[in-house]
Image: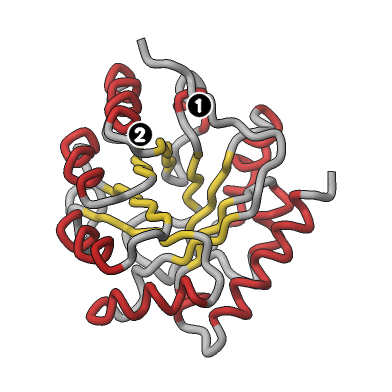
Amino acid sequence: MLKHCGLRHDKLTTQIGPSVLCADLSQLYEESEKLLSCGADYLHLDVMDGHFVPNITFGHPVIKCLRNKIKNAFFESHMMVSNPLQWIEPTADAGVNQYTFHVEPCNKNEIEDICRKIRECGMKVGLALKPGTPISVIQNYIDYADLVLIMTVEPGFGGQKFMSNMMEKVKLLRQANPGLNIEVDGGVGPNTIEQCAKAGANWIVSGTAVTNSKNPGDVINQLRYVTDMHLHSG
């Protein structure tokens, strides 16, 4: 039987993870190093298979090459794929630290098995929800996860408009799970971080707001400041 995750924290921390999706992927290593040197806590790596979402990015072979050059950074793979079980072992072999998968293509029996397999392979577990998926879908599995990702755009493409109505999901999730890491992804930047932080998110994925900025370090610092302010206000 799968053990419940023992990685809860009484004191949550702010984590800022730029998405490299909209960076110059021909310079993935250089772009990643730049983001890390600007203060990123982790790299958010968007893996898309062209089936679950209508786009294709990169997979474990590219991530493994990146890991060979960047030894110590925390890598989160956001698995926008139709068969998340299939890619667990190769993703772990690529050196990924956290495997965040969408529950939508899975039946209820599969979710627990996938969580177990991820942990057996030495990675942390993330559960991801598309905007139209209610949090009730993962209610029975939250204790198996290290993190829940609430999408604030439809997954598949960067640079989309932030969906502020998703903040209600974040609020409800935070109220019911005060020690859970909650991540938001999609349209997050200086203009929307206040909503995210106030709702209770503490893991912040930001794409174009960081990668398109002339001063990405300043953007990362701003995201961190606002999130910290709300995280420690209570």
Q: Quadrant of the C terminus?
A: top right
Q: Which mark is residue 31?
A: none
Using a 10 Å C-alpha cutoff, classify the residue at mark 1 as few (fewer than 14 neighbours), some (14 to 19) or many (20 or more). many
Res. 172 visible in picture: no
Residue 212, position as x, y percentages in the image: 46, 83
Please name the residue shown 52% across and 61% down the image: 41
Residue underneath mark 1: 142
Instruction: Name the outermost residue toward the bottom.
Output: 214
Under circle 2, the secondary element is: loop
State how many labels appear.
2
Left or right: 90 in relation to 155 = left
Instruction: Name the outermost residue toward the front.
Output: 71
Q: Is residue 185 above or below residue 176?
A: below
Please name the residue shown 27% across and 61% down the image: 67
Left or right: 62 in relation to 132 = left
Residue type pointed to by label 1:
Ile
Left or right: 108 in relation to 87 = right
Residue underneath mark 2: 103
Residue 30, position as x, y percentages in the image: 33, 80
**Front-most of 119 and 175?**
119
Q: Which is closer to the viewer, label 1 or label 2?
A: 1
Residue type pointed to by label 2:
Val
Please name the residue shown 19% across and 38% down the image: 89
Of the numbered discs 1 and 2, the one sitting upstream in the chain is 2
Residue 158, picture quadrant: bottom left
Measure the C-alpha gap from mark 1 to mark 2: 12 Å
Residue 156, picture quadrant: bottom left
Residue 119, position as x, y percentages in the image: 34, 30
Q: Is residue 228 above or below residue 148?
A: below
Please name the residue shown 15% across and 58% down the image: 61
Q: Is residue 221 above or below residue 202?
A: below
